Image (cartoon, rainbow, N blue to C red):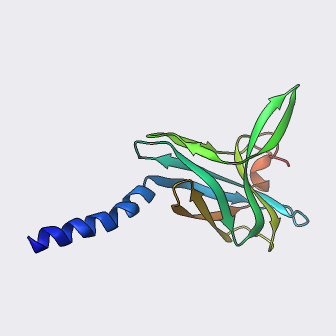
Amino acid sequence: MKIKYLLSIALLLWMPALASAEITVAGAWVRMPPPVADTAAGYMILNNSGDADISIISVESAAAANPEFHSMTMHDGMMHMQKMDDVTVPAHGKLEFSPGSNHLMLKDLKRKLNAGDHVMLKLNTSDGHTVDVHAEVRDMRKMQGSHGGGHHH
């Protein structure tokens, strides 16, 4: 009887860890900014294996003073960028942040980012969990000619 009680307590303590594991991140990377820039764009795919939508209410990084999610929309033939207060990853779905679309904006960089550097991010969910993200800085200048230009802010 005592063992069942202890197992029940252990399971209850372990359940919050299960909830935080519902969000996983794939393909996280940051575009290396030009030498004079104080912002950089980041990209990733957020996957939600859970049965409920999960909102990311903020993002933190030691690399930037003001990291935030941005949406990209076309209006009157021009692309516009707007801060997103939060983002929602649908249940059993994904949310993609990619060049020319929604992205993470690392504003007010605290250090120069070079190709091969690593940026750590912390995504904070509305239910109090955090998701740690490890993103590599990539130099995309070599690839710009092959797809018609870069993503500018």
Question: Where's residue 116, x and y in %?
Answer: 67, 69
In this rendered view, identify the residue nearer to me: 61 or 152: 61
Left or right, residue 140 beside residue 9: right
Question: Where's residue 94, x and y in %?
Answer: 52, 42
Q: Does 106 sit above or below residue 96?
A: below
Left or right, residue 88 beside residue 73: left
Q: Does 138 sit above or below residue 97?
A: below
State the residue lying farthest toward the left. Answer: 1
Residue drawn at point x = 57 percent, y = 48 percent: 55
In this rendered view, identify the residue nearer to me: 37 or 105: 105
Q: Does 34 sit above or below residue 48?
A: below
Residue drawn at point x = 76 percent, y = 39 percent: 72
Location of residue 75 (image quadrant): top right
Q: Does 110 sit above or below residue 144?
A: below
Residue drawn at point x = 60 percent, y = 60 percent: 123
Location of residue 139 (image quadrant): bottom right
In this rendered view, identify the residue nearer to me: 121 or 153: 121
> How many tags in the picture?
0
Question: Where's residue 3, x and y in %?
Answer: 12, 73
